[in-house]
Image: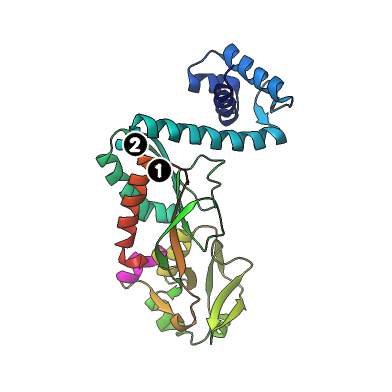
Amino acid sequence: MDRLHLMNVFVAVAEAEGFAGGARKLQMSPPAVTRAVAALEERLGVKLLNRTTRYVRMTEAGQKYYEDAKRIIGLADEADNAVLGINAEPRGQLTVTAPVLFGRLYVMPGIVEYLRRYPAVEVNALFVDRVVNMLEEGADVAVRIAELPDSSYRALRVGSVRRVLCAAPDYLDTYGIPQTPDDLLQHKIILARGLNSHNEMRFSRNGLPQTVKLQPILSVSDNDSAAGAATAGLGITHLLSYQIAAPLQAGKLKIVLGEFERPPVPVHILHREGRHSSAKIRAFVDLMAERLRAELSLN
């Protein structure tokens, strides 16, 4: 059998975690899919999948082969598209990932505009508050709010956000405005775990880092809840500026200790790097870059 065909079959089975699911995705019969995977394992001389009556899981060798196969299939698709001229019009499936709140506020409006412009594209939006492995989870484009390590992905900087300490005006009227990070020890603290791990908040004081260990009255796993509790006057919280842009503008929250903020956090758009730029990815990245750079709260 053709080697690229065998790779396609294996990738489909691995992602579906089953032969039946892989067969449906490829519109092949289950016996044909089973034969293809067996032929690939025989060709390689290694076991790629562990099979039970209820599920299929990749072996260690299978996981490594899956990553390489996905890359090779992607390169082959790019080469086909370049030769056939398909890149002239965006089409196909596009998977985009971003943090939950950022995705809802900024990425989703861009997706809506993108789909109106390019109706031949289907978008899968994966909004989660964790770092998505783009290769393993099939993401074409990712929005990351962080300094980026070196990688094989292209990164386009589109803005930045601040780490801000904030509270409701009523709370500050009652308990006073902290003048230094150490003053927080006398305040009610709402801790958003995503930005502040180990009950700590970090600041910059005279150009030097400072860490304050705190005992929060409330710890939450999501940023929305922390912002909501602070807006209700419960205490002081530490979040990224875009997460509280609306209540800040409405005067429901005020920033404190701004002179002790650490440097801003960059916002990047990441996408897969290839010899031929896919039209669907290029069009989406261009659209999102234009929109995000125009956002006053990100620049």
Q: Which residue is mark 2?
A: 87
Q: Which residue is mark 1?
A: 277
Q: Is 112 positioned to the left or the right of 188 in the image?
A: left
- Find numbered disc 2 in the image and state the secondary structure of the residue it sits on: helix
Is residue 297 something one can see in this rendering? Answer: yes
Of residues 259 and 160, which is closer to you in this image? 160
Vertical relation: 296 (above or below) 279: below
Q: Overall secondary structure of the magenta stretch?
A: helix
Vertical relation: 299 (above or below) 282: below
Q: Is residue 245 magenta?
A: yes
Vertical relation: 264 (above or below) 224: below
Render colour scheme: rainbow
Of residues 140 and 227, which is closer to you in this image? 140
Of residues 261 and 248, which is closer to you in this image? 261
Residue drawn at x 33%, y 45% as measured from the top left: 283
Residue 70 occupies quadrant: top right
**Residue positioned most to the front:** 83
Task: Give coordinates of residue 160: x percent, y percent.
Answer: 41, 66
Task: Give coordinates of residue 16: x percent, y percent.
Answer: 56, 28
**Residue positioned most to the left:** 117
Is residue 232 something one can see in this rendering? Answer: no
User: Mark 2 packing: few (<14 Cα in 10 Å), some, or many (20+)?
Assistant: some
Q: What residue span does the magenta drawing correspond to?
A: 243-249
Q: Is 251 positioned to the left or the right of 262 in the image?
A: left
The amino acid on which the numbered mark 2 sits, given as a three-letter code, is Asn
How far apart are the alpha carbons under marks 1 and 2?
8 Å
Q: Is residue 50 magenta?
A: no
User: Mark 1 packing: few (<14 Cα in 10 Å), some, or many (20+)?
Assistant: some
The C terminus is located in which quarter? bottom left
**Looking at the image, do the residues carrying marks 1 and 2 touch, with CB atoms under 8 Å apart?**
yes
Residue drawn at x 38%, y 31% as measured from the top left: 83
The amino acid on which the numbered mark 1 sits, given as a three-letter code, is Ser
